[in-house]
Amino acid sequence: MYDEPFGAWLVSRYADVRAALADPRLVAVPPGRTLAHLEGGTHSAHRAVVSPAFRGAALAVLTAGVARTAFVLARRLAARQEADLVTEFCQWLPTAAAVAALGLPYEDTARVHAWCRTGLDHLGGHHSELDAFLRPYIARRRAHPGADLLSALCTARADGRPLSDEVVAGLAGSLLGAGGEASARGLASFLANLLDHPGQLAVVRARPALAAGAWAESLRRDPPLQVVLRRAVEPVGAIPVGATVACLVGSAGRDPARFADPDRYDAFRPDPGQLAHGSGRHFCPGALLARLTAEHGLRALLTVLPGIRWAPGFRPTPEGLISRSPRSLPVRLR
């Protein structure tokens, strides 16, 4: 249906949202230079370049960097009695993990974190300060590549040609932006859901392999981005060219025609679906980084702080319309 106050066509059912996110006639907005914005053969060529950076030896390097970063942040809380996981863990881990994955200096995490709060998001965008920051690192990786993701992008070739500095910066920016607000919100909701269900948390603690499913279920029930916008470049049924389509991901994840008891968090739900990171050809390549961050963040907290639990009297309350998650997560650490 068309919602005049919002100025967009609304799509809310699971099957419809999944179809809209995968429809080539609906493209990402605003204009940009990341995989989410590329179409046709250009998109396929660039995805083929980026995908190997999330496999094999590169994946092992990525995983090790995320795990190391998670334990560093968790150990900083070890001597404390109480902490707010949002401000002291969730807001820092995704950014620090992305910085480590790209092989950038750890001491620059605070600078990237600040950019994520002033316009840099999972779509990368044109961020002049970030581009200036990345330029010398791109030049060094082209001359002396290493085992990090930035080196993989700098040495990759699409259609026989290396990626331009602009494309490399855009892809790196999308990964760094993915370590910003959306990933921090997703991690906060994930920890809130498990801490709110101590029985399920105990099972995941005993069987760490179940963490991936617990993360997927949290994304279904409480996606960090409740609304994803698309623009029609061709007519789609009643939707005219140029119209904005609002994919209501939060609604789709609680569609009772698709999920039994959809408001309940069930870490062991057999098929929680997968919409929070897109669908079809534009499935977000940063989804793996987000999952690794969630899994290793949880593992670090449970290992370093085995007695973690809610502060007395606290229950998480999600806030926000477009982006949604708990604003704070006060916990007792021992």
Image (cartoon, grey):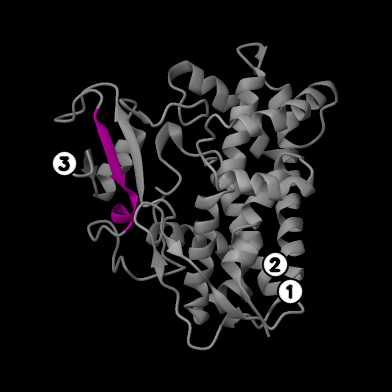
Q: Earlier in the sequence, mark 2 or mark 3?
A: 3
Screen quadrant of the N terminus: top left
Marker count (numbered): 3
Callout 1 secondary element:
helix
Q: CA distance from mark 3 to mark 1?
A: 51 Å
The label number, if any, that marks residue 218 in the structure image: none
Question: Residue drawn at (77%, 57%), measured in percent from left and top?
Answer: 68
Q: Which residue is mark 2?
A: 300
Look at discs 3 and 1 and give the one toward the viewer.
3
| Residue 65 shows up from this direction | yes
Q: Which residue is mark 3?
A: 4
Q: CA distance from mark 2 to mark 3?
A: 46 Å
Callout 3 secondary element:
loop
Q: Can residue 228 be found in the magenta stretch?
A: no
Locate residue 48, reporting x and y percent: 58, 25
Q: Nearer the viewer, residue 2 or 257?
A: 2
Question: Residue drawn at (51%, 60%), measured in percent from left and top?
Answer: 215
Most extreme residue toward the top, as rendered? 160
Look at discs 2 and 3 and give the one toward the viewer.
3
Question: Which region shows up in magenta?
Answer: 243-253
Question: Residue drawn at (84%, 21%), measured in percent from left and top?
Answer: 143
Q: Is mark 2 in CB contact (under 8 Å) with mark 1?
A: yes
Q: Amino acid at mark 1?
A: Val
Most extreme residue toward the bottom, as rendered? 312
